[in-house]
Image (spheres, rainbow, N blue to C red):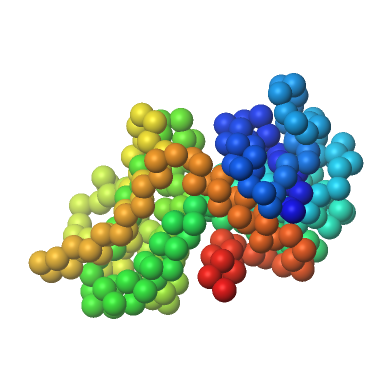
Amino acid sequence: MTRIILTGCNGMMGHMIRDIVKEDSEAEIVAGIDLSDEGTNSFPVFSSIEKCDIAADAIIDFSTPKILDELLRYSIEKQIPIVLCTTGYTEEQLAQIEAASEKTAVLKSANMSLGINTLLKLVQDAARVFAAEGYDVEILEKHHNQKLDAPSGTALALADSVNEAMGNPYEYVYDRSQRREKRDKKELGISAVRGGTIVGEHDVIFAGKDEVITFSHTAYSKAVFGKGAVSAAKYLKGKATGRYDMADVIAANQS
């Protein structure tokens, strides 16, 4: 049984993870962290993680970058592995996460979906075939109209996967409206759409002469992110200090 502390337990993703864990015989939420207690939880809720005195095997964070300091401090002090699902971290915070992984087990992913994390590997393989032959690479992502950041962290992760596979030759281009020139071969275009209630769509396009190959992922519900987060928490239980990602979870599931 994996005992989980859930930060942001009363948010939309918190509610979703609570429902997922109810159906999982291998996981249990033992405490929640949120500004207020709705009174409907089967576990105690604390206004900050520093007040939590419940033993646990992992922390799942779906809250806000604002509380990263206290989350990492608690994880290190209690030696409880942490799954960071929140997006929108600054460069300084990303460096802070890397430093913390030298003192505790940290799993962070731009996207918790098992499908997206499999796609990250597939586009690397595709890049070695198509980009190597001069195909242009473009990424299109679509999200709901309430999303604050653009492009999405997932789009950037997909771009990084392609770039790394080819030895990092690409320049990321987010807006061509001010460019009056032909597309450079070493451009990797990333476009963002914001509208309605789109949960998340990502297309990675390899466009060559007379053919186009597109890898697509569509999330119809945010439950895919919750399921990935719970899988990550179960994987991280008992893991040694270090930096982990969803590729590790997928590899463990395949073994």
Apparent side of residue 73 relative to residue 226 in the rendered image (left or right):
right
Determine the image quadrant of residue 246: bottom right
Residue 218 screen position, x and y as percent: 36, 47
Apparent side of residue 126 relative to residue 18 in the rendered image (left or right):
left
Viewer can see residue 11: yes
Viewer can see residue 95: no
At a point 40% along the width and 45% down the height, the residue shown is: 219
| Front residue of 102 and 215 | 215
At a point 13% along the width and 69% down the height, the residue shown is: 209
Residue 124 screen position, x and y as percent: 39, 71
Q: Say which quadrant the C terminus sits in.
A: bottom right
- In this picture, is 184 found above or below 179? below
- In this picture, is 118 found above or below 16? below
| Front residue of 240 and 157 | 240
Apparent side of residue 242 relative to residue 193 in the rendered image (left or right):
right
Disc tally is 0
Apparent side of residue 162 relative to residue 208 in the rendered image (left or right):
right
At a point 59% along the width and 69% down the height, the residue shown is: 252
Determine the image quadrant of residue 28: top right
Determine the image quadrant of residue 226: top right
Residue 52 screen position, x and y as percent: 85, 39
At a point 44% along the width and 63% down the height, the residue shown is: 118
Given the current orientation, which residue lies at the most extreme top position? Answer: 39
Residue 47 screen position, x and y as percent: 79, 30
